[in-house]
Image (tube, rainbow, N blue to C red):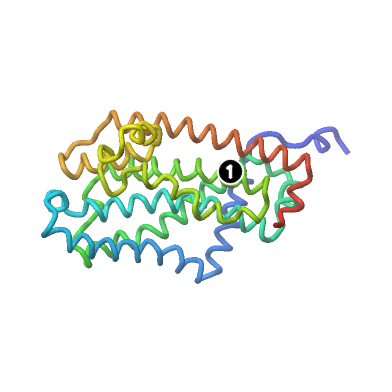
Amino acid sequence: MSEAHLTPNRAFSLRRVFAMVRRYWYLLRGSWPRIVELMYWPTIQMIMWGFITLHLRDTSTWVAEAAGVLLTGVLLWDILFRGQLGYTLSFLEEMYSRNLGQLFVSPLRPIEMVAALMTISLLRTLIGILPAALLAIPLFAWNIFTIGLPLIAFFFLLLVMGWAVGMIVTALLLRVGLGGESLAWFIIFLLVPVSAVYYPVDVLPVWLQWVAFAMPPVYVFEGMRAVLFEGIFRWDYFAAAVGLNIAYLGLGATIFLWSFHVARKRGLLLAGGE
């Protein structure tokens, strides 16, 4: 056998990424309960907050000034949540089936799996969010798409932050095993109080505002309110969110790759139990 065949392929391969995306897509496509679950929770959230908006529209001048401000906040928050959950759940499915060891005796590299998880997270998020956003139009006469191009920026800023949190969660799962699977569901909600989803950031105590402004989501939700209330896109908020997202994405990738390296050395990829 030639030396070329004995040398492992260290180059990043889009073919391997695409193969992993197809694997996750087939799992999703072949299970209608999974697809229903993706659409169910965003839709229920939208309906609940839609009725709250109808109630507050006649009693709150803040809500009356910008129709749909709460509904838009709910839908944008679900992008962050679904982005993180879509990333983490796909990784958890590999742990449930004890398949990590088999995957990584193949030429698959950790960074390629990260790219595949990001891609399937994007697809899962779109499947979950689009039906809820479209239903809000006939049910509550609110079309989030009227925000225009800023909506695309908000979508990807929140999605990338969800990926960063997903990397940290999967890194923890590699270390503690399936006993820590509840982290996939609750850790993202630690960001809710400081993300200013449903209220302006200035209602927070001053010391907590400093924490909030260190998180990318607060710039998205403050930017969303600037678009709805003032009709302007805050480029300064956008730049701050992009910079912080790059930092958090780099931090998440570093933590995941380090945790993966430790897990491989200790044989944890073959364990993955409780």
Q: Mark 1 = which residue?
A: 114
Identified by mark 1, the residue type is Val
Q: Position of residue 235 (x, y in %)?
A: 27, 30
Say which residue appears at 46% left-offset and 31% top-offset.
Answer: 246
Number of other residues with Cα within 10 Å of mark 1, as a class: few under 14, some 14 to 19, many 20 or more: some
Q: Position of residue 17 (x, y in %)?
A: 60, 46
- Give the quarter of the figure containing the C terminus: bottom right
Position of residue 27 relative to residue 199, above or below, is: below
Give the secondary structure at mark 1: helix
Camera-side residue of 261 and 214: 214
Residue 230 occupies quadrant: top left
- Is 36 placed left or right of 182 in the picture? left
Q: Residue furthest right?
A: 1
Say which residue appears at 56% left-offset and 43% top-offset.
Answer: 167
Residue 182 occupies quadrant: bottom right
Camera-side residue of 78 and 137: 78
Q: Residue furthest bottom?
A: 32
- Is 157 placed left or right of 18 in the picture? left
Q: Position of residue 20 (x, y in %)?
A: 61, 51
Position of residue 3 relative to residue 56, above or below, is: above
